[in-house]
Image (tube, rainbow, N blue to C red):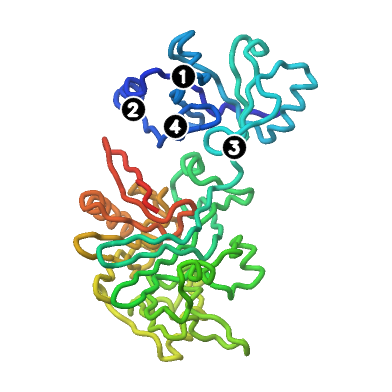
């Protein structure tokens, strides 16, 4: 059995007192709490390097944590060892006659499988075995949100996978893998989240990868489209014919692959037959004249047919696409990458595209290795984050696998995303 220390569980009677020490006095980051109903406990994880601390707060008087505190007072409750195969580990322990609290694994915090070894078998120490969840939680539900007089509908075109190192640049793997676990090829799961804005017209922002990718490329990117944009539109009560405007944040394949499709004869045509398409003029220039550094991301089949069909309009910075929807140049990821500002009756939402590809990219210096102009990304994020916090923007994270949108909060210099969708 291979095992390594995952965390140390600490039973607490007074959570606020515990936070006053670990968070306020030591300055450690306490993650959002998670209630584990099966154990009648609320868990608060505190990363401290590779292992973590877990503050355990009882939610019922008959829970194991409540009984422990009543008998012994607050303090270290258990240590947790992470194993790759908890079922195999339990069989091995059983054959060696090790006394167990749990004969079979059960659900624990963070979606993991857990089982406890009796303290009498481990020199008085309660030992928990944990098999971590093998994949990132995925959210794909079509969801509506009212922003003033505008209706926003978060969609999904499925999921794909990109190298975790490339997605986080110089950020060490030991930091980002705690939030987005890589597969055996070092790839992390990424969402594909176009957004509908319904107001004066029905606007679609970006459109995912689409269905033109060949089998080899689909394998490289781990493309998963069992549930895709057509399904999401149907769940929203819409079809491709209902889309009147289609807007590109930029012209990379994972954002505009769904702009075109092949007809029955194999010819490339606009996917949304009644739509007018909009892209940034200078972004178009870069996309149609690619170089060695960006050629793999700018696939001509995704946007050139739009110009040939006469349905493409090229615009500049700060263009109002329709009432309440305006482009805002961020640069950084590409030279003319755009975020989309959506405003109605004093409320603001922002389609962040690849400026904040996931909520994990919240810290200013957590930049993608894919960014062509990383210092421009850093500069924009520094200014935008404070603006988003102060004005309570609703930020849409196009590639986050687990959430669609949230508000950026800051406390004691630590930023978090408060989930809305």
Q: Select label 4 or label 3 by which is in front.
A: 3
The residue sitting at 41% across, 78% down in the picture is 243
Residue at mark 2: 23
Q: Select label 3 or label 1 by which is in front.
A: 1
Closer to the N terminus: mark 3 or mark 1?
Answer: 1
Q: Are marks 4 and 3 in contact (CB under 8 Å)?
A: no
Q: For marks 4 and 1, give the CA distance.
A: 28 Å
What is the quadrant of the C terminus in the image? bottom left
Closer to the N terminus: mark 2 or mark 3?
Answer: 2
Mark 3 Cα shell of 10 Å, populated few (<14), some (14-19), many (≥20): many
Q: Select label 2 or label 1 by which is in front.
A: 1
Residue at mark 4: 47
Residue at mark 3: 132
Give the camera-side residue of 97 and 243: 243
Q: Secondary structure at mark 3?
A: loop
Q: Residue 9, how many percent across, how many down? A: 50, 22
Residue at mark 1: 61
């Amino acid at each position: 059995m291979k095992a390594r220390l995952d965390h140390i569980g600490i039973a607490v009677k007074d959570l606020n007192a515990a936070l006053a020490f670990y968070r306020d006095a030591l300055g450690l980051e306490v993650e959002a709490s998670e209630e584990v109903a099966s154990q009648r406990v609320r868990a608060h994880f505190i990363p401290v390097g590779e292992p973590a601390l877990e503050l355990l707060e009882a939610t019922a008087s008959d829970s194991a944590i409540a009984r422990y505190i009543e008998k012994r007072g607050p303090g270290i409750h258990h240590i947790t060892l992470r194993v790759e195969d908890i079922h195999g580990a339990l069989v091995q322990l059983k054959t060696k006659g090790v006394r167990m609290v749990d004969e079979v694994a059960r659900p624990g915090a963070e979606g993991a499988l857990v089982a406890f070894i009796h303290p009498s078998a481990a020199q008085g120490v309660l030992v928990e075995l944990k098999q971590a969840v093998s994949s990132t939680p995925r959210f794909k539900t079509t969801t509506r949100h009212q922003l003033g007089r505008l209706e926003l509908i978060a969609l999904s075109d499925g999921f794909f996978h990109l190298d975790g190192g490339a997605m986080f640049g110089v950020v060490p793997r030991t930091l980002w893998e705690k939030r987005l676990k890589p597969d055996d090829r070092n790839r992390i799961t990424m969402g594909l989240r176009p957004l509908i804005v319904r107001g004066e017209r029905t606007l679609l922002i970006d459109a995912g990868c689409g269905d033109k990718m060949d089998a080899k490329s689909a394998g490289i990117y781990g493309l998963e489209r069992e549930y895709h944009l057509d399904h999401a539109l149907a769940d929203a009560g819409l079809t491709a014919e209902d889309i009147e405007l289609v807007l590109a944040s930029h012209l990379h394949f994972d954002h505009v692959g769904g702009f075109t499709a092949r007809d029955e004869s194999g010819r490339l045509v606009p996917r949304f037959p009644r739509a007018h398409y909009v892209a940034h003029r200078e972004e178009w220039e870069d996309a149609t004249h690619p170089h060695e550094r960006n050629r793999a991301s700018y696939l001509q089949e995704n946007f050139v047919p739009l110009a040939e069909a006469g349905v493409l309009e090229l615009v500049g910075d700060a263009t109002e696409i329709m009432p309440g929807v305006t482009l805002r140049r961020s640069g950084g990821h590409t030279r003319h990458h755009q975020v989309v500002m959506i405003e109605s009756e004093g409320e603001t939402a922002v389609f962040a595209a690849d400026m904040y590809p996931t909520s994990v990219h919240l810290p200013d210096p957590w930049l993608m290795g894919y960014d062509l102009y990383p210092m421009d990304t850093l500069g924009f994020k520094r200014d935008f984050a404070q603006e988003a916090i102060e004005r309570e923007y609703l930020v849409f994270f196009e590639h986050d696998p687990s959430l669609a949108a949230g508000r950026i909060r800051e406390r004691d210099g630590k930023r978090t995303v408060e989930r809305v969708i």
